[in-house]
Amino acid sequence: MKYLYATAIVLTAAIFLSACEPESPLDETYTVQVIDGDEVLVGKETRLMWQSYDPDNVITYLKQITSDKADQYCADLEWAGFLDWRLPTIDELRAMVEGYPDLEPGGRCKVTEKCLEYPCKDKGAKEDNDHPCAHDENKATGPGPAGCYWETVWRDKFCGPHWSTSPVENGTGERWVLNFYDPAIFIVVENAGTAFPRCVRK
């Protein structure tokens, strides 16, 4: 009887502990769904739906293009049965960052939808040589595939600069861009530079 009682206690404790174990970061952050044959990633907290891609047919997917073409790409996109795709804001791109706290939401980099002027990239610096929105020394050392600064669910393709819709306030036709390889947030002149379009919808 004592043996059965002890066994029951051990089994109950094991069940309790397994139930309390935290989910993996992937499970906490995104769900992967296939809708009408197209893969999408849905943020569990943000409820944003992101265009993913077919890993067996990536050649027809994203290319680095100018800002006008990126805007048009998302506006024309029909994916997973939806037509209301758009480019993300800089805040929405920052929500994808993993493994570099300065660029993650709430990090030291002050470039957000509330701070879009050019000097915002230098706010939060501890000294003249400190750059909270960029760190070239950490290239390709993130936790994602091939060292990308995003989670495994994004895979290893298209790990580079991504357009946002966020303009540089008081600028002359420039936008904020986030690079998931360096990692960095920086400025690109519209239609003079190129970056990836990563389309999103609510």
Image: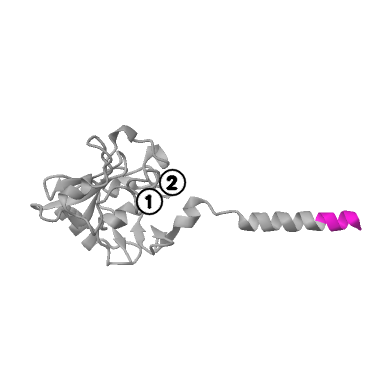
Regarding mark 2 in the picture, which secondary structure is present there? helix
Q: Is residue 25 left or right of residue 72?
A: right
Question: What is the crowding at mark 1: few (fewer than 14 residues within 10 Å), some, or many (at least 20)?
Answer: few
Residue 184: give x, y in percent of width and height. 27, 42
Residue 160, quarter of picture? top left
Locate the C terminus and report the quarter of the image it occupies. bottom left
Q: In the rendered structure, are the residues bearing label 2 and label 1 in contact, judged by CB atoms less than 8 Å apart?
A: no
- The one nearer the camera, 108 or 168, is 108
Report whether residue 170 is seen: yes
Is 119 part of what is drawn in magenta? no
Q: How is the image coloured?
A: one colour
Q: Is residue 114 above or below residue 187?
A: below
Q: Residue at 79% x, 57% y: name it.
A: 9
Determine which residue is flagged by label 1. 54
Q: Can you tell which mark lies on residue 86?
A: none
Determine which residue is flagged by label 2. 152
Residue 15, quarter of picture? bottom right
Amino acid of disc 2: Thr
Locate the N terminus and report the quarter of the image it occupies. bottom right
